Amino acid sequence: MNRNRSSFPYSAWQCTPGRSVFFWPLILAAVWSAMSGEARSGEPCTSGPQPGQRCGPYAALIATGAERGQSFCYVCQTGDKPAVVLFAHTLSDPFGKLVAELDKAVAEHQKADLRVWVTFLSDRQVELDPQVVKWSQRYAIRRVPLGIFEDPLGPPSYRLAKDADVTVLLFVKQKVVGNFAFRTGELTDDKIKEVMNMLLRFVGEKK
């Protein structure tokens, strides 16, 4: 029995020109996607309010510190004092090192009345709460309260980037003076030093 070579099943999958017509667009799309991904990975991560912009008020459910168990707004309490707010998705080791350094800074810069707090972003607050407590104990975080905002996207007005695992905002008199954002794996020891050096620029001398 003779097959009609122009029929769809035969020409699409067995004839070389047919394969080219069907597969080249897929190949080109895959290459473009890979190239775009590489380009984005080489760009700095941008997340949250930028220098000169204000940090709006928001409340999170606090897991550690004096306000544990409360829905609390640290932005509202801070006023014009220098502050550092950190948003994070994961309880990572590099992030623990950064928060531990900031915990020390709070004790060392009492004269500046520095305020620091951490807000984890998750829609699983009940599960995450005990993990946050253990994580704070592991890194001996005593002065920096840790809370959970029950939305992985964070407070809407902050417009945090989806690919940012950690966003660090330094602000004075309610205006951002420093912004750092890191994708997963980007928060290195050198980046931690950059954050701490920026902090020293606006809190002044110790005690």
Image (tube, rainbow, N blue to C red):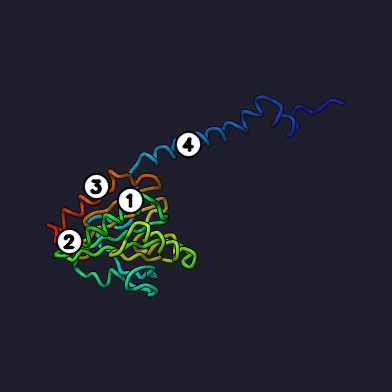
**Which of pointers 4 and 2 lies earlier in the amino acid sequence?**
4
Q: Amino acid at mark 1?
A: Ala
Residue 50: which quarter of the image? bottom left
Q: Give the x, y percent position of residue 167.
A: 33, 54
| Residue on which the image places disc 1 | 181
Decide: few, some or many residues near mark 2? Use Cα within 10 Å; few <14, some 14-19, many ≥20. Answer: some
Q: Which mark is residue 152?
A: none
Q: Secondary structure at mark 2?
A: loop
Q: Amino acid at mark 2?
A: His
Give the Cα distance between marks 3 and 1: 12 Å
Please name whichever residue, 55 or 30, is drawn nearer the observer in this view of the structure. 55
Tell me whether the residue at label 3 lies in contact with that at label 1, contact meaning CB atoms closer than 8 angstroms.
no
Q: Regarding mark 3 in the picture, which secondary structure is present there?
A: helix
For discs 3 and 2, the disc positioned in front in the rendered view: 2
From the image, which quarter does the C terminus lie in? bottom left
Front position in the image: 107 or 186: 107
Circle nearer the N terminus (4, 1): 4
In the image, is residue 16 above or below residue 136? above
Residue carrying label 2: 109
**Mark 4 and mark 2: span between their CA atoms?**
46 Å
Q: Nearer the viewer, mark 4 or mark 2?
A: 2
- Badge 4 amino acid: Ala
Instruction: Tell me which numbered mark, 3 or 2, is placed earlier along the sequence.
Output: 2
The residue carrying mark 4 is: 34
3 vs 1, front mark: 3
Foreground: disc 2 or disc 1: 2
In the rendered view, does 99 fall on the left or right side of 25?
A: left
Q: Which numbered disc, 2 or 1, marks the residue that appears first in the sequence?
A: 2
Task: For marks 4 and 1, give the CA distance.
Answer: 23 Å
According to the picture, the residue beneath numbered tag 3 turns out to be 194
Say which label, 3 or 1, has the lower sequence index: 1
Give the residue drawn at x 28%, y 57%. Answer: 169
